[in-house]
Amino acid sequence: MTRNSPSPHDEHRHVADGSPRWSERIALSATSDDERTGVSIDWIVADAQGRGAIDVRLTRAGFPLVVVVDDDLPAASKGRFELRAPALWVDLVVETPLAHVTLGLEAFGVAVGEGADVGPDVRGDRTPLGLDLEWETSAPPGTIVGGYAIPCRVHGEVLVADGAVEVTGKGARSHMWGSAAGPEPGTATP
């Protein structure tokens, strides 16, 4: 990656540099234009120990928060942004580097009440969650510590136990790798 802007190659998986603090991380967010639905995904694709973690949150006006949190996952498939684990499948596909990505997710999450402690041991009502969303670049990418961030327009569908929600709105995505790729999922906003 150059100091001024990311390259299309930066959209691919990266090789660990040997540092014990190395990780590769993807963060995506979306908020519907009416601000009634929000989605955030914070995914450690791989760390120096060959493990991963994910924190997914769905907010909808008038409904409980739905979360998928797991800090003990295998790393994503070698060379890809895909993970299959018990009760979780997530796949990020770079359709056009620096311009368009799609994300598919199928998981069992937990619907939690307001003010609930949301961590790996979160308790609540088991809730199926599916995402079929697209992020299309809406402004030039920018560099951040350890990677890049891109403002986007987002559209697609969120499937939750009580039905489907069409989402069209604003969002962002970032990709970081190296020793400065950030804290554990859920401790920083994407």
Image (cartoon, rainbow, N blue to C red):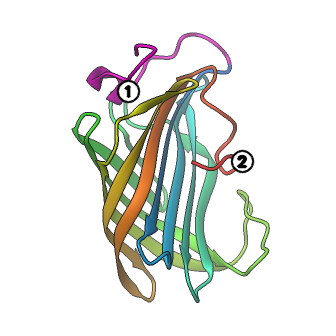
At 58% across and 10% down in the image, what residue appears?
18
Q: Badge 1 is on which residue?
A: 13
The mark found on residue 53 in the picture is none
Q: Closer to the N terminus: mark 2 or mark 1?
A: 1
Q: Residues within 10 Å of mark 2 (few under 14, many from 20)?
A: few
Query: Quadrant of residue 2 in the image?
Result: top left
Compared to residue 100, the image places residue 86 above or below, namely: below
Compared to residue 190, the image places residue 181 above or below, namely: above
Q: Amino acid at mark 1?
A: Arg
At 37% across and 39% down in the image, what residue appears?
81
Q: Badge 2 is on which residue?
A: 187
Q: Nearer the viewer, residue 45 or 38?
A: 38
Q: Amino acid at mark 2?
A: Thr
Give coordinates of residue 120: x percent, y percent.
Answer: 71, 57
Mark 1 lies on a secondary structure that is loop
Q: Nearer the viewer, residue 79 or 171?
A: 171
In the image, which residues are magenta?
Answer: 1-20
Mark 2 lies on a secondary structure that is loop
